[in-house]
Amino acid sequence: MSTAPKQPLVRAIADLLAAFESVGATHMIIGGLAVIARGVVRHTDDADATVWAADVDVPRLLRALREHGIVGRIPDVEAFATQSQVLLLVHQPSGVPMDVSLAWLPFERDALARAQTVSVEGVDIPMATAQDLIVYKAIAWRDRDQRDVEELLRLHRSSVDLAYIRDRVVEFAEAIDEPERRGQLDAIVARVDRERGS
């Protein structure tokens, strides 16, 4: 990287990636910046990432994060991560909040293996594919996630494997006892297809 990135978010992610790399953690960005990199016009001011948990000793990772200016944004970040499999962090120099999920599931392992590197302001950032982002967003399913799913489908409908997406969403929906998620996803797909004249 020849010059420092200008955006606080990109500077924060550069430090986050450096911490991951220092402990050998397989990682990628799965939040708003990844959605933007896939062509969706939207704003984001936080960073969502995932790491393959089998690669990670959480106390060691937290030490590496601190060395790069990233600390917990709740009192006992390690205990919370043990319970929820999410590290709630903040990049102190920029104030950018960060959520780092600890990935254990086969889908997450495969998604990490499919990550594609995108250069943003000279920083090479591994990001989830559009297809995998749709799955992640269909599980989270907040209002923002639903809009992201719709926009990602508008842009990438012809290139994603919809059967694969549906199968993964059904698996997750059963695990979290939200069987209606498949129908909610299908409603968005149908709306996008009508717009496309499919």
Image (cartoon, grey):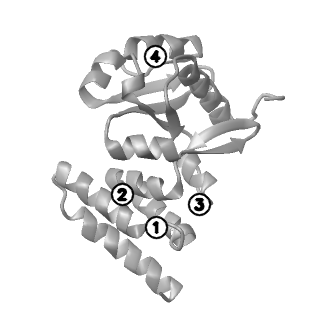
Q: Which mark is residue 40?
A: 3
User: Which is nearer the N-term, disc 3 or disc 4?
Assistant: 3
| Upstream in sequence: badge 2 or badge 1 | 2
Q: Amino acid at mark 4?
A: Leu
| Residue 58 horizontal/vertical position (percent) | 38, 17
| First in sequence: mark 3 vs mark 2 | 3
CB atoms at circles 1 and 4 under 8 Å apart? no
Task: Report the amino acid beneath label 2.
Answer: Ala
Q: Taking 69 as reference, is 134 left or right?
A: left
Q: Which mark, by number, is residue 61?
A: 4
Q: Amino acid at mark 1?
A: Glu
Residue 174 in the image: x percent, y percent?
18, 54
Separation (CA) of disc 2 from disc 1: 10 Å
The correct choice, above or below, for 88 with respect to 178 in the image is: above
Task: Tell me the CA gap for discs 3 and 4.
Answer: 31 Å
To which residue does mark 1 refer?
Answer: 150
Tell me if label 2 and label 1 are in contact, CB under 8 Å.
Answer: no
Mark 3 residue element: loop
Residue under pointer 2: 138
Label 3 and label 1: CA atoms lie apart by 10 Å
Q: Amino acid at mark 3?
A: Val
